[in-house]
Image: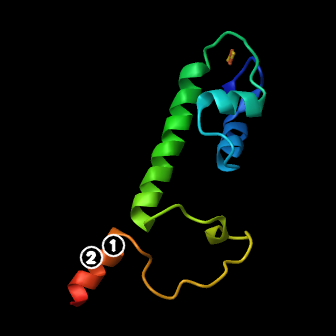
């Protein structure tokens, strides 16, 4: 689906810019995706997408105890060492307390 009709920029384009890690703001996404000044009706949707992406990242960090390395993504480079125990974070702390 198009986010910006004036520049023919799709949701996939925006998600690609966000997931590559170089963009953290709507302004950076606009620069990376090639948004040029137009009617401006896409601005609200673009800001919402950036906000949703940040919220999802913060939630993932909270659940895992930190940023998820790219090695955790299938087909990415292999991790340095496999995770054999519980991942650090609130869930691991709760499991340790329950075991004690
Ligand atoms: S829809 Fe993006 S500038 Fe018009």
Screen quadrant of the N terminus = top right
Residue for badge 1: 91
Residues at discs 1 and 2 in contact (Cβ within 8 Å): yes
Residue 21 in view of the camera: yes
Q: Which mark is residue 63?
A: none
26 lies above or below 22: above
Residue at point 63% right, 84% down?
Answer: 81
Determine the CA span between mark 1 and mark 2. Answer: 5 Å
Residue at point 66% right, 48% down?
Answer: 21
User: Which residue is nearer to you in this view: 95 or 1?
Assistant: 95
Q: Which mark is residue 94?
A: 2
Using the rendered view, name the quadrant where residue 46 is placed: top right
Number of residues whose C-alpha sits closer than 10 Å to that of mark 1, classed few (under 14), some (14–19) or many (20 or more)? some
Q: Position of residue 59 (x, y in %)?
A: 42, 54
Screen quadrant of the C terminus = bottom left
Q: Is residue 91 left or right of residue 83?
A: left
Q: Position of residue 18 (x, y in %)?
A: 65, 43
Number of residues whose C-alpha sits closer than 10 Å to that of mark 2, classed few (under 14), some (14–19) or many (20 or more)? few
Disc 1 on helix, strand or loop?
helix
Residue 2 in view of the camera: no
Q: Position of residue 14 (x, y in %)?
A: 68, 37
Q: Is residue 63 left or right of residue 52?
A: left
Query: Most extreme residue toward the top, as rendered?
Result: 39
Q: In this figure, which colouring scheme has been used for the structure?
A: rainbow
């Amino acid at each position: 689906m198009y986010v910006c009709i004036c520049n023919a920029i799709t949701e996939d384009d925006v998600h690609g810019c966000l997931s590559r890690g170089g963009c953290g703001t709507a302004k950076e996404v606009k620069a990376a995706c090639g948004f040029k000044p137009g009617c401006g009706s896409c601005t609200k949707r673009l800001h919402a997408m950036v906000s949703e992406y940040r919220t999802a990242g913060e939630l993932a960090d909270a659940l895992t105890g930190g940023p998820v390395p790219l090695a955790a993504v299938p087909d990415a480079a292999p991790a340095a060492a496999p995770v054999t125990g519980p991942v650090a974070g609130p869930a691991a702390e709760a499991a340790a307390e329950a075991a004690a």
